[in-house]
């Protein structure tokens, strides 16, 4: 059964010349994100408040967020239309692709359609469960076109269910 989220944070992304992404959260926080050179399924990030870490797309639209300072891992479930629901109850919403008055209408319509179907991500996964998700994601990716480095990995981070707005919440 879908679970309600406790807090919604919207953001917008800007692709920089060095292929990193500058993310501006509407609560004032800023974040810089770049694809991990070793894996096109992992993004390294740091914010303007001293936090840093990585987001890894495990598969089946599940994202693992690891904090560099040792805080507990959280998981997210990408819900399409640039929305990710995190295991701490936060819903992040990408407003980058919605602009102007039409964007406001589209955002309201898609929010209503998507928010009614949001399923909570897992609260925790064992290392074996994570590895199985990675293995399944790699198996499904090997049947595709292989992709490329792309925009700091954006657009390449998918598990076979293409939605260009999904970029690790």
Image: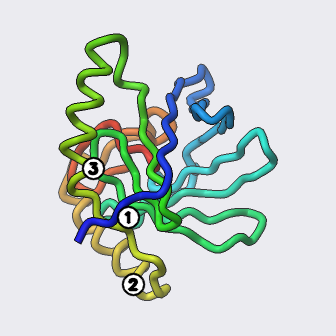
In terms of secondary structure, where does tag 2 sit? helix
Residue 88 image position (x, y, % from top left):
53, 65
Eyeballing the image, is 55 above or below 35?
below
Q: Which residue is mark 2?
A: 129
Q: Foreground: 150 or 133?
A: 133
How far apart are the alpha carbons under marks 1 and 3? Answer: 17 Å
What number is the disc on residue 62? 1
Q: Given the current orientation, which residue lies at the most extreme right position? A: 50
**Which mark is first along the chain, 3 or 1?**
1
**Residue 23 in view in this figure:** no
Residue 51 image position (x, y, % from top left):
75, 52
Q: Are marks 2 and 1 in contact (CB under 8 Å)?
A: no
Where on the picture, by quarter, is residue 73?
bottom right
Eyeballing the image, is 34 above or below 133?
above
Q: Residue at x 29, y 48 (%)?
A: 146
What number is the disc on residue 79? none
Crowd band around label 2 with a 10 angstrom C-alpha radius: few (<14), some (14–19), many (20+): few
Eyeballing the image, is 4 above or below 129?
above
Crowd band around label 3 with a 10 angstrom C-alpha radius: few (<14), some (14–19), many (20+): some
In terms of secondary structure, where does tag 1 sit? strand
Q: Which residue is mark 3?
A: 115
């Amino acid at each position: 059964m879908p679970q309600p989220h406790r807090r919604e944070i919207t953001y917008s992304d800007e692709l920089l010349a060095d292929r990193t992404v500058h993310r501006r959260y509407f609560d004032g926080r800023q974040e810089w994100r770049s694809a991990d050179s070793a894996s096109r399924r992992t993004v390294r990030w740091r914010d303007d408040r001293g936090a840093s870490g990585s987001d890894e797309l495990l598969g089946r639209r599940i994202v693992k967020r690891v904090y560099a300072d040792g805080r507990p891992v959280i998981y997210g479930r990408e819900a399409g239309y640039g929305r990710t629901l995190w295991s701490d109850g936060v819903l992040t919403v990408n407003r980058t692709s919605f602009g102007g008055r039409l964007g406001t209408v589209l955002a309201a319509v898609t929010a209503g359609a998507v928010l009614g179907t949001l399923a909570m991500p897992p609260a925790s996964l064992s290392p074996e469960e994570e590895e199985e998700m990675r293995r399944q994601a790699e198996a499904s990716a090997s049947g595709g076109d292989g992709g490329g480095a792309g925009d700091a990995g954006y657009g390449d981070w998918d598990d076979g269910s293409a939605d260009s707005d999904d970029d690790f919440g």
